[in-house]
Image (spheres, rainbow, N blue to C red):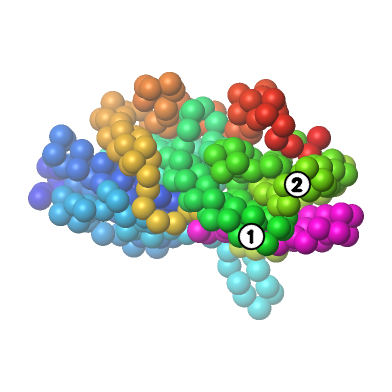
Amino acid sequence: MNQKKTKRIGVLTGGGDCPGINAVIRAVTKTAIMKYGMEVVGYLDGFWGLIHDKHRLLSYDDVSGILTLGGTILGASNRADPFRLPQKDSDGLGFQDVSDQVMENYRKQGLAALIVIGGDGSLSIAQGLFEKGMEVVGVPKTIDNDLSETDVTFGYASAVFNATEAIDKIHTTAQSHHRVMLVETMGRYAGWIALAAGVASGGDVILIPEIPYDLEVVCQKVIERSKKGKRFSIIVVAEGAKPRGGELVVDRIVEESTDPWRLGGVCRKLALAIEEKTGLECRVTVLGHLQRGGSPVPCDRILATRLGCAAVDFVMKRRFGDMVALKGNRILSVKIAKAVAKQKLVPLNHPLIVATKAMGICFGE
């Protein structure tokens, strides 16, 4: 195609991978080609590709058959913030603003717009580039479901499915060996995955960041179950859960990352405390990246497809600086700046919390 006669759009997948990204890439590419006769440039490894001008032209055939694939065919990176690019030299680790270089690379490709598929970190970068003059449209992506201004993000349902399936399998081991099994889920500072997977798998105790837990209450719950003949307990713990008056458990700090804190280890700490106070044997399972891998569940494939198609329509309507969002059953437009202004946390009056408390599920309060 003649670049001068054909509009081109770019697409990149920033931050961590999750099920459904390829479904968005497919929808963006096919809609752009079939509906609008545009070319699609895919940037490699998120913003790293935009910084270094590394990309590939995406054809219709390139995206055929990727609907069910997990991960992203373009690659991703969470260490390539163009406003704060890590640079190592003899003086140690420093950071450089290469956003002007990114703008130059963007203009060089003759793009009509860039579609950024990402969570709060990637979309915050997208907002910064929009403020510098880039034509940007956002697509909300994160298994954590913590992005504001959309009812749900694609990838979340698949992560809940993966976590639930894993906890179901742990149930049988817990019953056989009469143990307290602690399962650590992802979610950073929001408890959406732990809450949904804990309810779906029949967890006895669910600990989320939004409700600081009391160790004594948790111990009392497992002792109570033991006295009633329930010789095992399942405790589902979000990685960002913390005791009342206590701190988050941080596994390590990666300074060059867009989100330096790596949470992890809360279950091991909690297991030792429960064993010491109750005498009951505890075992820990950290689900980790298992939750974000594999094929997307059908509802994520459908949502990702709708969002990808809508993102291209937004480009043609010049809805720049906007993010496609799901509200009820409708795809609407919201400002990226508003979506990343604050995290969407689990409200304390959430219907799942209300219902499960009525059933005797413990939240450590």
Residue, x 38% and y 40% (percent of image)?
Answer: 300
Residue 75 pos. (x, y %): 38, 60
Callout 1: 10 Å neighbours few (<14), some, many (20+)?
Answer: few
Q: Quadrant of residue 283?
A: bottom right
Question: Residue tagged by mark 2?
Answer: 229
Residue 309 pos. (x, y %): 27, 35
Residue, x 34% and y 41% (percent of image)?
Answer: 298
Q: Is residue 282 magenta?
A: yes
Res 75 seen here: yes
Residue, x 47% and y 59% (percent of image)?
Answer: 77
Res 125 seen here: no
Judge by depth and name the residue closer to the eye, 229 or 359.
229
Question: Would you place residue 120 above or below residue 69 in this image?
Answer: above
Q: Is residue 54 left or right of residue 271?
A: left
Question: Residue tagged by mark 1?
Answer: 176
Q: Quadrant of the C terminus?
A: top right
Residue 26 pos. (x, y %): 26, 46
Residue range (magenta): 263-290
CA distance separating discs 1 and 2? 14 Å
**Which amino acid type is shown beneath numbered disc 2?**
Gly
